[in-house]
Image (tube, rainbow, N blue to C red):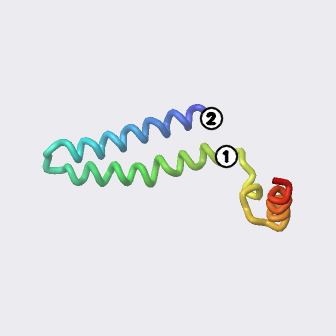
Amino acid sequence: MKFIKIITFLAFLASFTSILCGIILNLDYSKKLIGFGVLGLFFVVFPLFSYYRWKDKDVKDYMLTKENLDKMRENQRNS
């Protein structure tokens, strides 16, 4: 899975570079560079990052189920 981490980092660098070039350089297509950078962040980098971070996690651990609420109450009583 290191491959996904590298691809995510490279896509982030490309998007961030595109945004910076659009802001710094005075070109005819500066606004397009900024737009493509933002699109890259939202449609490529964020989904890849989310997949990489959540791939081996159980979603039930993060949901407010009755069991998890009981565990939280138990932890608050103990502390």
**At 40% from the left edge and 49% from the top edge, which residue is drawn?**
40
Corner quadrant of residue 31? bottom left
Q: Quadrant of the N terminus?
A: top right
- Please state the total of marks drawn on the protein image: 2
x, y percent for residue 54? 65, 48
Where residue 4 is drawn, which disc sits there? none
Q: Label 2: few (<14), some or many (≥20) within 10 Å? A: few
**At 76% from the left edge and 58% from the top edge, which residue is drawn?**
60
- Contact between labelled residues 1 and 2, with CB atoms less than 8 Å apart: yes
- Does residue 7 sit above or below 76 in this rendering? above
Q: Residue furthest bottom?
A: 66
- Does residue 22 sit above or below 6 in this rendering? below
- Does residue 48 sit above or below 62 in this rendering? above
Tell me which amino acid carries mark 2. Met
- Does residue 16 sit above or below 76 in this rendering? above
SS at mark 2 in the image: loop
**At 47% from the left edge and 47% from the top edge, which residue is drawn?**
45
x, y percent for residue 43? 45, 54
Which badge, 2 or 1, comes first in the chain's sequence?
A: 2
Mark 1, residue position: 55
Left or right of 48? Residue 41 is: left
Left or right of 79? Residue 18 is: left
SS at mark 1 in the image: loop
Left or right of 21? Residue 47 is: right
Mark 2, residue position: 1
Q: Label 1: few (<14), some or many (≥20) within 10 Å? A: few
Tell me which amino acid carries mark 1. Lys
Q: CA distance from mark 2 to mark 1?
A: 10 Å
**At 73% from the left edge and 62% from the top edge, which residue is drawn?**
63
